[in-house]
Amino acid sequence: MKRLLALLLLASSGLAAEPAAPLLVQPGAVISQPDLRQALGAEWSVAKGRWEPKEGVLLATELPDEHHAAVLHLATGPVSLVWECEFRLKGGKVFYVGCDGARHVGRLVITPKNARLCEDSTEVKGVSPSHTLAEAPLDLQPEEWQRLRVEYTGSQMAARINDRELKAEHEYLATPKVRWWFASSGATVEIRNIRISQGVPPAPK
């Protein structure tokens, strides 16, 4: 009986450890995986706000004098991509993962109650918003860590926030990328376990 119980426990722990199925692509070569215990590498650049690595957590803080969300760029080039991290909103109002070519191309927008995948062909700051392609309700508590995965390839983007999934396709998303970015609005947002990888096709089943 004890041996049977042990086997069942091993089986269940193995299932729990199995990585989640890819939405579009799976991780290939790592582009950046900072340990967040020292300064970020040269592939990262601060555009707005304050981004402070501290004891394995990246603290993202909007600066009131800038009148803009805090933004951190990552140089990637035009590759398929898997963007993974954990975050908690603390007092933050909005958390973003987005991508740019010569201008904004697309973004994932996360609030405590909602997630949206958007393409930015219609976005003009202060005039017209991004075009929402997919949307899902959320219920994120400010002190709890949330798991996030964003995938991109071709004209498609997808996201998984904990167990909530979104997928979208639009021709504008195929615009060649120069960089991707984190952004946060409101009080400090915390981010950890960051890994950004080139996306490769899923292994055949």
Image (cartoon, helix red, strand yellow):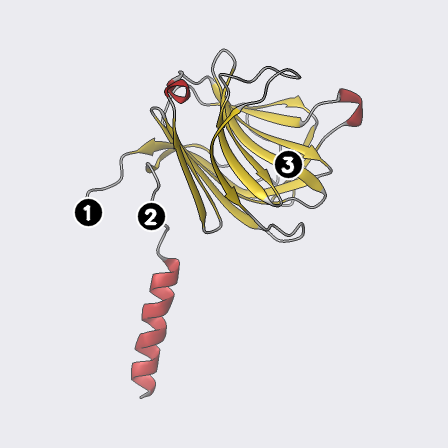
Which residue is pictured at 39% across the width and 61% down the height? 16
- Badge 2 or badge 3: first in the primary sequence: 2
Question: In the image, which is nearer the foreground, mark 3 or mark 1?
Answer: 3
Q: Position of residue 24 (x, y in %)?
A: 33, 37
Marking on residue 182: none
Q: Quadrant of residue 155?
A: top left
Say which amino acid is labelled 3: Val
Q: Position of residue 101 (x, y in %)?
A: 47, 15
Q: Which residue is mark 1?
A: 205
Say which amino acid is labelled 2: Ala
Say which amino acid is labelled 1: Lys
Q: CA distance from mark 3 to mark 1?
A: 37 Å
* Disc 2 element: loop
In the image, residue 142 sits, relative to residue 200, either above or below, namely below
Of residue 189 and residue 127, the one placed in the foreground of this image is 127
Q: CA distance from mark 2 to mark 3?
A: 27 Å
Q: Quick check: 129 left or right of 159?
A: right
Q: Position of residue 66 (x, y in %)?
A: 75, 21
Q: Count neighbours of disc 2 (C-alpha within 10 A) and say few if under 14, some if 14 to 19, many if 20 or more.
A: few
Q: Which residue is mark 3?
A: 94
Q: Which residue is mark 2?
A: 21
Which residue is pictured at 36% across the width and 52% down the height? 19
Q: CA distance from mark 2 to mark 1?
A: 11 Å
Q: Quick check: 66 left or right of 190?
A: right
Q: Quadrant of residue 198?
A: top left
Which residue is pictured at 34% across the width and 78% down the height? 6
Q: How many marks?
A: 3
Q: Is residue 34 visible to us here?
A: no
